[in-house]
Amino acid sequence: MAENTNSGGGNAGLAFIVGGLLVVVAIIAWFVFAGGGMTPETKEVSVDVDLPEVAAPAVPGN
């Protein structure tokens, strides 16, 4: 009677390939969602808020 000596080692190569593809996809996703790691253009925002001066009402009784 023949013994089955195959312990599933043939799938190790497939697992290595799938793992490598997973790493490549993760790196591509990081570049896509993180903006590629490049510094974006700096934008200068200048906000000028001019409010009218408000005078407090006079205190009655003085």
Image (cartoon, grey):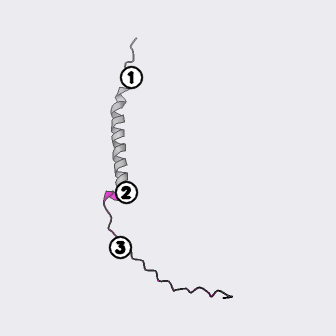
Q: At which x and y percent is residue 26?
A: 37, 48
Q: In the rendered structure, which disc, 1 or 2, sits on the residue that comes first in sequence? A: 1
Q: CA distance from mark 3 to mark 2?
A: 22 Å
Give residue 44's mark.
Answer: 3
Q: Tell me the residue at 55%/85% (across/down).
A: 54
**Which region is colored magenta?**
33-58
In the rendered image, the vertical position of residue 50 relative to residue 30, given as above or below: below
- The image quadrant that residue 8 belongs to is top left
Q: Residue furthest right?
A: 61
Q: Nearer the viewer, residue 45 or 52?
A: 52
Q: Pointer 2: what residue?
A: 34
- What's under tag 2, amino acid-wise? Ala
- The image quadrant that residue 23 belongs to is top left
Q: Are marks 1 and 2 in contact (CB under 8 Å)?
A: no
Q: At which x and y percent is residue 40?
A: 33, 64
- What's under tag 1, amino acid-wise? Ser
Q: At which x and y percent is residue 34?
A: 37, 57
Q: Pointer 1: what residue?
A: 7
60 relative position to 20: left or right = right
The stretch drawn in magenta includes residue 41: yes
Query: SS for tag 2?
Result: loop
Q: CA distance from mark 1 to mark 3?
A: 64 Å
Query: SS for tag 3?
Result: loop
Label 1, residues with CA under 10 Å away: few <14, some 14-19, many ≥20: few
Q: In the rendered structure, which disc, 3 or 2, sits on the residue that comes first in sequence? A: 2
- What's under tag 3, amino acid-wise? Glu
Q: Tell me the residue at 37%/52% (across/down).
A: 29
Position of the N terminus, as image quadrant, is top left
Q: Tell me the residue at 62%/88% (across/down).
A: 58
